[in-house]
Image (tube, grey):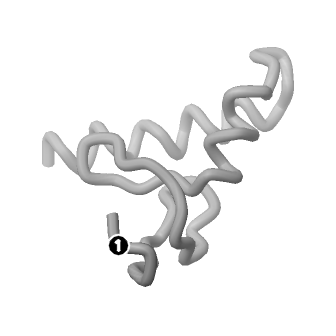
Amino acid sequence: MEEHTEHTCIICEQKKREGIFIVSEFICDSCEAEMVHTDAQDAKYNYFIHQMKQIWVQKNA
């Protein structure tokens, strides 16, 4: 990934430079770190699941 290229994060929907791609969708470093450390009982966990489902929906559309 080029350092100067910004991508829109599928989780926070902000443009960021650093992160990972899953299939063809981008997740920024800060969202990835937050997801990894979020407990399954946390209310935000369901939000992450909802946002991640977009990856599979868009891929199979």
Tell me if mark 1 has few (under 14), some (14-19) or many (20+) residues whose alpha carbon lies within 10 angstroms of its own. Answer: few
The image quadrant that residue 15 belongs to is bottom right
Say left or right for 48 vs 6. Answer: right
- Measured as percent of width and height from the top left, residue 55 is found at 34, 44
Say left or right for 17 vs 12. Answer: left
- Measured as percent of width and height from the top left, residue 32 is found at 62, 42
Q: Is residue 17 above or below residue 27?
A: below
Name the outermost residue toward the front.
Answer: 3
Name the image quarter holding the N terminus: bottom left
Name the outermost residue toward the left.
Answer: 61
Q: How many labels sit on residues?
A: 1
For the point 35% across and 72% down, which residue is it?
2
For the point 41% across and 56% down, which residue is it?
26
Quick one: 6 or 24, which is closer to the camera? 6
For the point 66% across and 49% down, which residue is it?
31
The image quadrant that residue 7 belongs to is bottom left
- The residue at which mark 1 appears reads as 2
- Measured as percent of width and height from the top left, residue 11 is found at 58, 54
Say left or right for 58 vs 55. Answer: left
**Mark 1 residue element:** loop
For the point 78% across and 27% down, which residue is it?
37
The image quadrant that residue 33 belongs to is top right
Q: Which residue type carries mark 1?
A: Glu
Say left or right for 55 vs 49. Answer: left
Quick one: 8 or 59, which is closer to the camera? 8
